[in-house]
Image (spheres, rainbow, N blue to C red):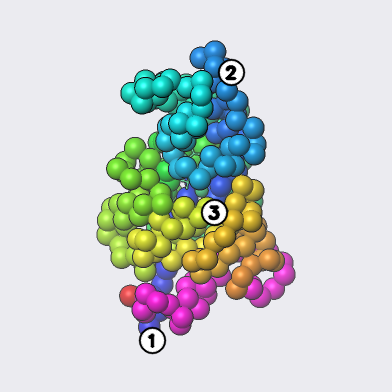
Amino acid sequence: MTTTVLQALLWDVDGTLAETERDGHRVAFNRAFEALGLPWRWDEARYGELLRVTGGRERLMADMAQRSDAPGNAGEREILARELHTIKSKHYAELVSAAQLPLRPGVRELIDEAAAAGVRQAITTTTSRSSMAALMRVNLGADWQRCFAAVVCGEDVRHKKPDPEVFKQALALMNLSPLQALALEDSPGGVAGARAAGVPVVVTRSSYFEHADIEDAIAIGPGLHTRQGWQPALAGAQGRVTLADLQAWRVGFESVSQFGPLN
Ligand code: XBP
Ligand code: MG
């Protein structure tokens, strides 16, 4: 059985690169409600429920569909959701620019290691380009795009995760087959999307999806900063998750893969 070298990492943003939801997106949505004089506020628990809906505008629509004080007409709700989302995105960019949302530990190290090893990297996210770029700029610098061969965001696809479109588009841009890549994700929707595209997935648990049922990952653990608490287990207690670990998980996956050998 032959195993190819890992050729690309496909990075999810929210929850995987950074813990953006509770103190970033959620706060920005609430500021947008406030800016338009709406009494609506999403507390942490409600926002956790709403995370089942991917995409900020879609999330607003889902919430409004359940409110008696939202516009009754679907067209009016759509207009309001767009207006709120524009305001929300500005507030989100302000929040991340104030450096309140750092990358998760171990992320920067793996990005740098992959870049040095010639493993290509892509952003595969549901989030809007402006919000993603604000986060990347503040954490990786103005030339953050140098690290990424492809960047596919919410507005680039017709169907957001759990649809596989974002992953398929990134693979097409890099001219890679699914099994030459590995996705890094935190949510059931993200895992479902990557798997539907045929891409193996490693999951780093984020705060909102700490206890979520996730079945289809080749490895799952608490974060890239630690070798402890991973399934399958990693040898050695000290240090972070490395490219070699990702490659080893892929080899293990290959031996039990329902996708067939990596090629
Ligand atoms: C992230 C999301 C996003 C953000 C909000 O999902 O669901 O909708 O919460 O972003 P994933 P926008 O991590 O799977 O990509 O408001 O910019 O849509
Ligand atoms: Mg995510």
How busy is the neighbourhood of tag 1: few (under 14 within 10 Å), some, or many (20 plus)?
few
Q: Amino acid at mark 2?
A: Pro
Assign the N terminus to one quadrant of the image: bottom left
> What mark, if any, has residue 39 been given in the picture?
2
Q: Answer with left or right where residue 120 lies relative to residue 22.
A: left
Q: Position of residue 190 (x, y in %)?
A: 46, 53
Image quadrant in which you'd find residue 151: top left
Q: Position of residue 109 (x, y in %)?
A: 58, 55
Q: Position of residue 205 (x, y in %)?
A: 60, 55
Inspect the magenta stretch and tell me whether residue 261 lies in it.
yes
Mark 1 and mark 3: Cα distance apart in space: 30 Å
Mark 2 and mark 3: Cα distance apart in space: 31 Å
Q: Residue at x 64, y 73 (%)?
A: 233
- Are the two marked residues, 1 and 3, in contact with CB atoms closer than 8 angstroms? no
In the image, is the residue at mark 3 within 8 Å of ligand 2 by its beta carbon? yes
Q: Which residues are magenta?
A: 233-262
Q: Residue at x 52, y 75 (%)?
A: 248
Inspect the magenta stretch and tell me whether residue 235 lies in it.
yes
How busy is the neighbourhood of tag 2: few (under 14 within 10 Å), some, or many (20 plus)?
few
Tell how many labels: 3
Give the label, 2 or 1, closer to the camera: 2
Sequence order check, earlier mark of 2 and 1: 1
Q: Secondary structure at mark 3?
A: loop
Give the label, 1 or 3, closer to the camera: 3
Judging by the rendered image, the residue that carries numbered circle 3 is 186
Q: Residue at x 64, y 72 (%)?
A: 234
Whether residue 144 appears in this view of the structure is no
Judging by the rendered image, the residue that carries numbered circle 1 is 1
